[in-house]
Image (cartoon, helix red, strand yellow):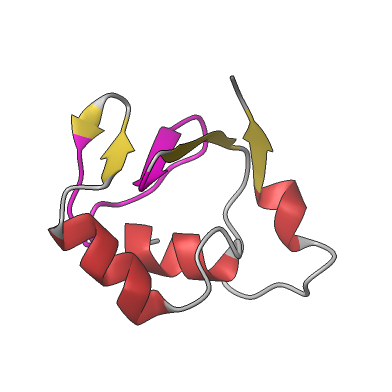
Amino acid sequence: MRLDKFLKVSRLIKRRTIANEACDAGRIQVNGKTAKASYDVKPGDRIEITFGDRTTKVEVTRILETTKKEDAVSMYKDIT
């Protein structure tokens, strides 16, 4: 699954266009490297999202094409 779609489906970012813009601006890193929106996300990948002074770090646990709001949290786990 593409990185921008994963961020939207997992509800880490509200809209896919915003996820795409964040990738283009270099605010998204996967496994320590700046990633493009087209990056193919796999379970085990570590994603770091930087918005302003706030940084969110998560590890991908599973990939789902569609999900309900309650199940979206199961797609990743927070890491610090």
State left or right for residue 80 relative to residue 17: right
Image quadrant where one finds the N terminus: bottom left
State left or right for residue 31 relative to residue 71: left
x then y, percent, for residue 75: 66, 50
Given residues 52 and 32, the one toward you in this image is: 52
x then y, percent, for residue 51: 38, 50
Asked if residue 43 is positioned above or below residue 21 in the image, the reply reads above
Specify the quadrant of the image occupied by residue 79.
Answer: top right
Specify the quadrant of the image occupied by residue 68.
Answer: bottom right
Residue lying furthest front in this view?
53
State left or right for residue 71 relative to residue 34: right
Residue lying furthest right in this view?
70
- One can see residue 2 in this view: no
Q: Is residue 75 magenta?
A: no
Total labels: the figure holds 0
Q: Is residue 46 magenta?
A: yes
Asked if residue 20 is positioned above or below residue 79 in the image, the reply reads below
Image quadrant where one finds the C terminus: top right
x then y, percent, for residue 14: 53, 74
- One can see residue 30 in this view: yes
Given residues 79 and 2, the one toward you in this image is: 79
Residue under the point 35% across and 57% down:
3
